[in-house]
Amino acid sequence: MNIICQFCKSKNFAAELPSDGKFTSCCRKGKIKLEKPSDALVNGQAPQYFQLYVIDSTQDTEIRVNHPANEQCHIRILDQIDRFIRHHNRLSNTYRMLREVQSQKQARIFPL
């Protein structure tokens, strides 16, 4: 993974490079703009969607329970769903790596 997308800076394999030199699989040639999950967490915003999988599983369950849309949900069931997704989702290792990167960044920002 040594080819960088000119729009979103994602890392790609050389074999993925389209003939026009603009990647579509990551950001649709710059048409899709996503805030990096670490930026949202650092800026003090409440994590949402896949950002919840980057943080600790106990913390993300608490965030889900406190969301107004989930007021009728049981924390035990939300926790079971979270554990199921973390165990069976093929992207769970990616989320785990992002959590490690986030922890390393926090350690540099707030050294002990």
Image (cartoon, rainbow, N blue to C red):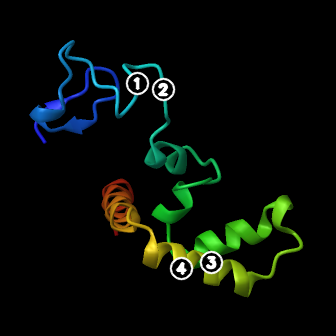
- Residue 54 picture location, percent across and down: 46, 62
C-alpha span from label 1 to label 4: 31 Å
Label pair 2/4, CB-CB below 8 angstroms:
no
Which residue is nearer to you in this view: 67 or 15? Answer: 15
C-alpha span from label 2 to label 1: 6 Å
- Residue 94 picture location, percent across and down: 34, 61
Location of mark 1 (residue): 28
Quadrant the N terminus occupies? top left
Q: Using residue 51 as the reference point, say whether residue 8 is left or right of it.
A: left
Q: Using residue 91 as the reference point, say whether residue 49 is left or right of it.
A: right
- Three-letter code for the amino acid on which mark 4 is drawn: Phe
Quadrant the C terminus occupies? bottom left
- Three-letter code for the amino acid on which mark 3 is drawn: Ile
Q: Earlier in the sequence, mark 1 or mark 3?
A: 1
Location of mark 2 (residue): 32
Relative to 11, say whether 61 is above or below: below
Q: Residue at x 69, y 77 (%)?
A: 78
Relative to 105, say whether 39 is above or below: above
Relative to 10, say whether 99 is above or below: below
C-alpha span from label 2 to label 3: 29 Å
Label 4: state its secondary structure: helix
Label pair 1/4, CB-CB below 8 angstroms:
no
- Three-letter code for the amino acid on which mark 1 is drawn: Arg
- Three-letter code for the amino acid on which mark 2 is drawn: Ile
User: Within 10 Å of the Cα at label 3, are there few (<14), some (14-19), or many (20+) other Cα atoms?
Assistant: few
Label pair 1/3, CB-CB below 8 angstroms:
no
Label 3: state its secondary structure: helix
Label pair 4/3, CB-CB below 8 angstroms:
yes
Q: Earlier in the sequence, mark 2 or mark 3?
A: 2
- Residue furthest to the top in view is 20
Q: Using residue 58 as the reference point, say whether residue 55 is left or right of it.
A: left
